Amino acid sequence: MTQHDRLLIIDFGSQVTQLIARRLRELNVYCEIHPFNRVDDDFLRAFAPKAVIFSGGPSSVFSEGAPMPPASVFDLGVPILGICYGQQVMMHCLGGRVERGHGTAEFGRAFVSPGRERLDLLDGWFDPDRDPDRDGGREQVWMSHGDHVSAIAPGFKVYGTSPNAPFAITADPSRHFYAVQFHPEVHHTPKGAKLYENFVRIAGFTGDWTMDAYRDEAIRKIRDQVGDRKVICGLSGGVDSSVAAVLLHEAIGDNLTCVFVDHGLLRLGEAEQVVTMFRDHYNIPLIHADESDLFLGALEGVSDPETKRKIIGKLFIDVFQKYADEIEGAEFLAQGTLYPDVIESVSFSGGPSVTIKSHHNVGGLPEKMGLKLVEPLRELFKDEVRALGRELGLPDSFIGRHPFPGPGLAIRCPGEITRDKLDILRKADAVYIDQIRRHGLYDAIWQAFAAILPMRTVGVMGDGRTYDYALALRAVTSVDGMTADYYPFSHDFLGETATRIINEVPGINRVFYDCTSKPPGTIELE
Ligand code: XMP
């Protein structure tokens, strides 16, 4: 099996440790984040990192039981980069001194000026064209520390200082140990990526973490895990489950069966698209479970948002299980779990309690049905899943699709759900998305959809009176869906879209645009 060069990030509980991993993955370097209390001598031996990074963290090296790496990490003979608390840990362990804040704490923007000597880690970092007499060739960084290093460890020298951190950049070049007080991984250290680039170059990484290589390796891993046994995969039409399904199919062919549960709450043409793509184009055995009568029947008369969600969630599991039972000999359930869902995070107190987030898309099923999990995307970030999808030949139009929630149109139809309203909503949503695509805005928007409001309003069309539904349009920008801002469409766009929807979709005579950010709103209406 191919073995990538691996970089180990030891997590001391920083809020931004994941960003270190992002910066490294952007450099095609394979890295894993592990909490300090899981890293011992055996782990280091097995992991065999080509370089190690110590993250920042909220602790103080003075506190009792302060998070520390195993001493053997310094004997691995590989480059180590310590960041913020990671720098203090290095100094503490290697014979330097750390002191408490006392007026030297720094939070936020700071400027680091170069020392006298050259350091390989800083190649291309300080701007040589800036006049050292005027601004000292200084470089902006982002600091966030209470304690600070007051004496560096033997073998180390200073290569950069800031007003409150005389040891902002330190290194022992002979051992390739580097320690910085600031956070190069955050956006506010504009040239931070350069430090990581230099660090991995010094460590000898070749940038072999590409999606092409990953695809082959992932296929081999799936075959090793599954052998000739059968796998079922719940397909939602979203990017993660689709990429997982196509990858699995490449690995095990017809031993994969996908189950696509159509709850009658999908968008216009969505079921046909999913079925055509997977069954006809990819030849993946696919059960199209048309259970719309069951779901819509159970939702009849229900208007409370939580009750709707609970009904849908429970029925989804029942239905999935019913179809999965028909697949004889299925031993595995495939899920599109991603890396951010599985990173073990160190609790903020730095204590030994470790929280593991694990995402069960079809929650509770694996245990209930005695299925083992296959999670071929668990090492990937979302943008890497998209890159893998492209590698597997999924069309761009599919990979770039906006997220769509599991409960579907049910949560875009506040109040009672009727087939009538769903039909109107599907048509209106299709016109809205078509407008967005025609204006070239689809990729600039994180998620956009229409919602049919539980109210009718009076209008006049031709010479007649109308009394029809009102529609809300929503479009947001976001990075991860946790926070969001409304998309600032032009008035022309909004006017044109409202006119098209009212002209083309019988049943709608009024259109609103939702200008609420998240918080205080949520993205979906329910
Ligand atoms: P909210 O409305 O909470 O939505 O701001 C944030 C993101 O999550 C999606 N969403 C869901 N996705 N199952 C899902 O798979 C759900 O139950 C669900 N509820 C909301 C929503 O579309 C948005 O992208």
Image (spheres, rainbow, N blue to C red):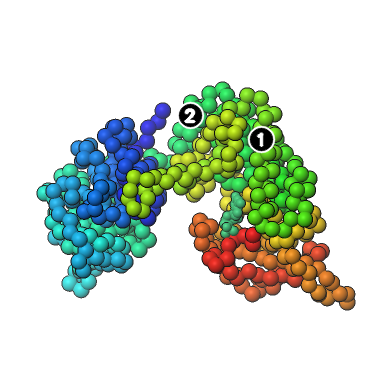
> Which residue occupies 65% across, 40% down?
317
Side of 67 where 497 appears, left or right: right
**Ligand 1: quadrant of the figure:** bottom right
Among numbered discs 2 and 1, the one appearing first in the sequence: 2
Which quadrant of the view contains residue 524? bottom right
**Residue 27 visible, this angle:** no
Where is residue 447 drawn, in percent x and y? 59, 59
As drawn, the label of residue 469 is: none
Q: What residue type is labelled 2?
A: Arg
> Within 10 Å of the Cα at label 1, are there few (<14), some (14-19), or many (20+) other Cα atoms?
some
Q: Look at the numbered disc 2 and give the secondary structure of its residue.
A: helix
Where is residue 335 drawn, in percent x and y? 56, 39
For the C terminus, which image quadrant?
A: bottom right
Q: Mark 2 or 1, which is nearer the eye?
A: 1
Outermost front residue: 64
> Which residue occupies 61% across, 27% down?
330
Where is residue 371 drawn, in percent x and y? 57, 30
Outermost left residue: 154
**CB at disc 2 and ligand 1 closer than 8 Å:** no
Side of 215 where 175 appears, left or right: left
Q: Look at the numbered disc 1 and give the secondary structure of its residue.
A: helix
Outermost top residue: 228
Q: Dot 1 corresponds to which residue? A: 321
Side of 147 where 463 appears, left or right: right
As drawn, the label of residue 220 is: 2
Which quadrant of the view contains residue 491? bottom right
